Structures are given as structure tokens and as C-alpha cells.
Amino acid sequence: MATDPKSAGSEGDAPAPAMPPTRRRRGPWWLARLVAGLAVVAVIAGGYALAPETHEATPTPTTGSAPTGPVPVVGADDRPYVPVRAEWDHRPSPPVDPGVLADLRFTDVTEAAGLDAPRLGRAPVSNEDMTGGAAVGDYDDDGDLDLYLTRLGLPNALYRNDGDGTFTDVAAAAGVEGLEPKVGYAGALFFDVEGDGDLDLLVTTAGTTRNLLYVNDGSGRFTEEAERRGLRWPATTAATGGSNTFSAAAADWDHDGDLDLAVLDWYTAPLGAFLAGEVDGYSEAAEAERDGSMCERAQVVADAGYPIPEGPEAPAAPRTKLFANDGGGTFEEVTADLGVDPRSMSGYSATFTDVDRDGWVDLLVAGDFCTSALFHNDQGRAFSDRTDEAGLGTDENGMGQVVEDLDGDGLFDVVVTGISFPSSEGPCNEVITVGCSGNRVYLANGDGTFRDATDQLGVRDAFWAWGATAQDFSNLGGRDLVVTAGWLDSDRNTAQDLQGEANPISRRSANSPSRYWRSVPSGPWPEVADQVGITDRGNGKALVAFDYDRDGDLDLLKVNTETAPVLYRNDSPGEHRRWLGIRLEDPTGRNRWGVGSRVSVATDQDATPTAEVRAGGSFQSGDPAEIHVGLGSARATEALVWWPGSAGPERFPIGRDGTVLTLVRGEGAGP
């Protein structure tokens, strides 16, 4: 996201560790919140930050999924906080032939499902305006998918799936409401920490509280054990802007049988020091790049090795960390040992995937300010930056990320969401923090490299985009792409702010529509969100596809920052559309859910759908550790599973579809 000095400075912690420069073109940067020429920069505690302040929006009613009635403000005064709604004229997509939609339709069932509780108990401050997380997983192992939602000023929610289309919040009984609800939380992730088969829960923060690790005791009760298990970050304070650890992902990157962990930080200090002229050593030519483009400035900082001020004015250390699991659920930080410089990224989303099919999961990072990256896994010993060689990283404001097979060739493609404004107000006017070139789609070539197909598919423009998902919502064999969008600046969020002539970026970024691109065999994918019922205009962040009602098609959850989430039930017809769900079970080690496994489903037709089981998702999202395969009229005949570290696939005969199967390692044929 292109905002914010509020998190760009000192947290009152130890200075960033000295690390060798990495060889890459992109670098991170601190920024002032320069919106249409307005900048606010403060130097606090010797670092770069804008001190959070209690701030309320003018009470202007919203529509859509906003809670009915005012939401009480915590820690400000007794006036209600009701988020303002921006009204601006986006260009509606032209209607498409109904035959392209194939009767695809979504229905908002948020209230009926019991998910319409408000997300906010107070007004967001600082980078809390970028929060809205969700994790989906079967924490109680009863076969259906449960839901965890992060909140701000209110306790977090753990919604147990009741199996009848409704959810019940059991967070208090389960012990996962959060330690400091008044501060608030950001992202969430279900994964099995100690390998006992129960899903545990990681919760990240954008505030002044710490990240949490809730360990599941197997009965649906959790105990917070982050620090005891080695997941430690420097303390934060209100005066320094808090934490920006938005997203996380887990995988067995070293093939020792357990799940290791990556947590990303939106770190902006090195470029901030450069722009503010607070570090020495830049050449005269480099100094001239302060007037260059966003990526040119980032390049200068990267080439210089990400210098930051030393001594009392040193900003806080970056909070991006890689943690190795010792096999029993205790972690050791190994970021520097693996050759990753956390100063090199303003990370928003992380995905582990085997890019080059060498049997080792690599790390893809969607990063703001030209810092998206591919870190290649060198057989568990190190991660090396292969961004340029792979043809990735051309996005400017990487925020959300999707890794799926978009074109049906069995290879995993990459989508990175960004910022653009296809509105009647004219083209996006670039400012220092906004690149405006929108999303990217990188199609895999099969050799670890990618080609840009953004305009080929016609999916560049999605406003101020965040979370994304690419799934087969029609069960016809093709993956559609859905992107959620919207950002309401917590510092400039009154009706007067949004209507001001000098504030077009903030006005356009708030209450952006979601985008739904329908996959077609050739030519640009048509955008059909309004036609299929995806109409909510809340400021969306997390986006997760999952079959909440187990009727065989994927539903869609959108999490908004200021208003209640939206659950869209998929009401597409099921006749003549076969499907198959697959869970994995690996009893041979501590990766019991088979995270990192690649699965292909052979059919009696040409199609061979392929997916990976992952612990992670798009921006502040945790997808369920299972895959969904749409078959159309085809019949599944065999599932091929490449388990982490295996020499080849294990083959499982498929005798039926229309159900969720559990495939157990060792019960098939082959490795």
C-alpha cells in the first residue's frame, strides 16, 4: 500500500542488524503519506514515524454490510464512530453474455450465517486502517470449515461451523479473543505447530500489542504460547507506530518433517532515511534519484545495501522473520542464517510454493514499493533472490498474492494485486507512494521463469486492491480471479477530506468495488462482479474461498476494515458439474496435514486439475488446508500426490466424486 510514515520509524528497539547487501534491483523505502501533494513527516524518538493519535471520522452513515447503529468508540470519547462512505463514479463493467456466466450467482448470507457482528469497537488509528484478517480451517476436526476473524477494539471471533449453514462465536470459550482487544489485530493463520494433527492459530498485529500463537489442546481449547515457543519480536509502543506484521505462511522448507514459519513486516525505514537525507554515503548521482520514480528510488536504496541511521536515531529493526521449527513446536529465528535481509522488503503477503519443481518450496513475497520478490530455496540451506531471473517483481505496490494454475497447464502462475483507478475522474495521477500500474499476472513457463500476461487477460485494474483468490467457482474446470479493494485513510477519513479537491487518491481508494474476472478460453477475461452478485463496497482486505456449507461449490468471504464481513453463498447450479474435495494426512512426520504437497487429479477427459495444499493465503488471509477441484462433466480417476521431499507421486485411485476425500500417505501406490 502506498501510505504512511506512521509505521516507518523507530519502535524504541534495537537498531536493525548489519547485513550484507543483497543483489537485487528493488529495495524498500520509508514514505511520508503523500496523498495528492499532502505530506506529514515527524521525527520521533530519533526515528521516522507519525505518532498515532485518537481520530474519529465525522459520523456519516454507510450502506452495505455496515452494522446497524453506532459502534462504541474505545479510548477516545463517548461519541459514536460510524465510518464515512466515499461515493465516486467508477467505470462499471459492460454486461457480458449470460452464456459466459453459466448461471454463476452469489447471494449475501452474512446475517443468516451469523457473521454480521461489527468488526470495530473504535476508530482505526495509524496502520490499523489496513487490517481485516481471516483464517479458515477445521480446528475441531469435525469435517466442516471454521472461521477466525480479527477485530479492532473488540475481541477477535472464532466462528465454529455448526454444519447447518450457520456459525457460532466460541472465541471466549476457546481462549482466542486476543490479549488486548482494545489494541486490535491484523492477519491470522491456522497451521499445525507441533505436529499432533490439531490446527493451531497464529494471529498478527498492526498495533502496539504482540503477535500471538494459540496452541490447540485437541479439545478446541487454546493456550497462548508465542514467546514460550520462540516467536518473539521487539516490543512496540504507541509512540512509535506499532507493528506492521500483516501476513504469514508456513511450510516444511528444510524437509525435516515439521512446519517452519515466515512472518512479513511492512518495513519502510531504509528508503525513508534516503528521502529524508538522514544517511550519508550516497553518491551524487544517487542523490539525484530522489526526484525519480518510485522504483528508481527503491533501486538506489537497494544498490547501497539499505543503509539506515545509526546511533540514537536508528529506526527499529525490521520485523520480517523466518522461524525454523525444532520438531516439537518450538521455533528459532533463522532469517539471517538463510540469507534473507528483512530490510529488503515491505512485505504484505507470503506464499510458499515450488516454483521450479525441484522438490523444495520457494518463498514468494508480495511487497510494497517495488519489493515483491522470489526467494529460491537452495535445498533448505538458504534462500537466494531469483526475482529478476524469474521475470517477476515488476509490480509497484504488491499487496495481495495468489499462486494457482490459471491457464490449466499444470503449472502454478502468480497474481500480485496493486493500485490503479479506472474511474471517470481520469487516469490515476501518480504520487510518490502510488505506482498506479495495477495488478500483475505472471504465467509460468515451466522452467522457473514467468511471462507477464496481465493485459492478455485484462485484469490490471482493480482500484486499491488487497486480497485475492483464484478458484473454480462454477465447477466447470476453469479458475476465475476475484480481487477485493478499498482503503480509507485513518488520518483523512471525514466527508470533507474525501470531497476535497486536493485529495483524489483518498477519495478514489475508499469503498472501491471488488472485481470478479471470469476465465474464458481466449482473449481478455470479462469483469462480472455486479452481474454475479459481488456488490459490497466496504473497504475489503482478506478474501478467502471455501465451501462453508459443504454443498460442493466454493463460497466467498470478504473481510472489511470498518464494517462487518460479507459471506457470499455460491448459488450456482450443481447439475452436471462434478467436483471433488481432497484433504491429505501424513502420519510419517509432524506435517500431518501434508502442507506443501502438490496434487493432480487425472480424469477420463483431457483436464488434469493441479493445486497445492498450503498454510497461508493472500493478504492477511489463511486458506483451508484442502483443495477443491471442479470437474465439469469429467470423472476423476486418480489423484497423484507429490508429498514434500518425495521422489515422485503417490497414486490414489478415485472411485467417486461429489465428496471430500482424505488421502493418507502410504495407502496409495508409489513413493
Image (cartoon, rainbow, N blue to C red):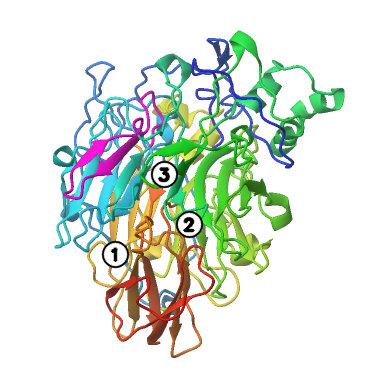
Residue 451 in the figure: left or right of residue 6: right
Q: Amino acid at mark 2?
A: Pro
Q: Amino acid at mark 3?
A: Gln
**Comparing labels 3 and 2, the label whose residue is closer to the camera:** 3
- Residue closest to the far bottom: 604
SS class of the residue under badge 2?
Answer: loop
Q: How many marks?
A: 3
Q: Amino acid at mark 1?
A: Asp
Label 1 sits on residue: 547
* Rendering coords of residue 319 (x, y %): 51, 31
SS class of the residue under badge 3?
Answer: loop
Mark pair 2, 1: CA separation: 29 Å
- 2 or 1: tag closer to the N-terminus: 2
Label 3 sits on residue: 620
Magenta stretch encompasses residue 332: no
- 3 or 2: tag closer to the N-terminus: 2
What secondary structure is the magenta-colored segment mainly? loop
* Rendering coords of residue 492 (x, y %): 45, 26
Crowdedness near tag 1: few (<14), some (14–19) or many (≥20) residues, C-alpha within 10 Å: some
Which stretch is magenta?
204-228
Is residue 157 visible in the rendered structure shown here? yes
Residue at left offset 28%, top offset 56%: 197
Label 2 sits on residue: 92
State the image quarter where residue 238 is shown.
Answer: top left
Mark pair 3, 2: CA separation: 28 Å
Compare residues 404 and 43 and report the one nearer the observer. Answer: 404
- 3 or 1: tag closer to the N-terminus: 1
